[in-house]
Amino acid sequence: MRYVLLCAALAVTPAFADDLIARSGSDTVRLADSPCSSEQVLKHLQPQMHAQFRAASAVVEGRTFSACWRVMGQVAHLLYEDGDQGVIPLTDLKREVTA
């Protein structure tokens, strides 16, 4: 299910200061520009890779998941707390609009 959300068509350059978000209905993936600090996610990575990953979270079917991400070419590669992985094309992400 998370894979479907990650592939949903939702424009951005790789460098940003604000959170980026992808939406599919009520499901969301939020990418932050802060270091990944989720121990549940980091345990799935070799220690030398920790600094490459940024913080992320997803809400899918009302459930919240911790995740971390990094840019790989033209996609954001996500790794979730349960070891599941996904990708979002960078062009599918939008800056969060706040009122």
Image (spheres, helix red, strand yellow):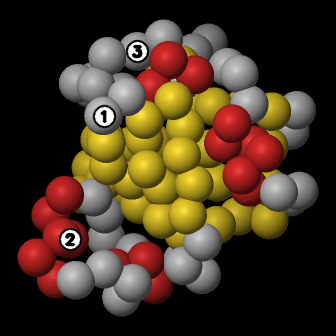
Q: Quadrant of residue 39?
A: bottom left
In the picture of the structure, the residue carrying the numbered disc 3 is: 12
Residue 29 position, x and y percent, is: 62, 44
Q: Residue at x 43, y 50 (%)?
A: 77
Q: Earlier in the sequence, mark 1 or mark 2?
A: 2
Left-right relation of 57 to 43: right
Residue 65 position, x and y percent, is: 64, 67
Label number found at residue 50: 2
* Element under disc 1: loop
Extreme residue in the left direction:
48
Q: Amino acid at mark 2?
A: His
Say if residue 28 shows up in the picture: no
In the picture of the structure, the residue carrying the numbered disc 1 is: 73
Q: Residue at x 48, y 55 (%)?
A: 78
Characterize the local packing of mark 1: few (<14), some (14-19) or many (20 or more) Cα atoms within 10 angstroms.
Answer: few
Characterize the local packing of mark 2: few (<14), some (14-19) or many (20 or more) Cα atoms within 10 angstroms.
Answer: some
The quadrant the N terminus occupies is bottom right
Q: Earlier in the sequence, mark 3 or mark 2?
A: 3
Q: Amino acid at mark 3?
A: Val
Q: Amino acid at mark 1?
A: Gly
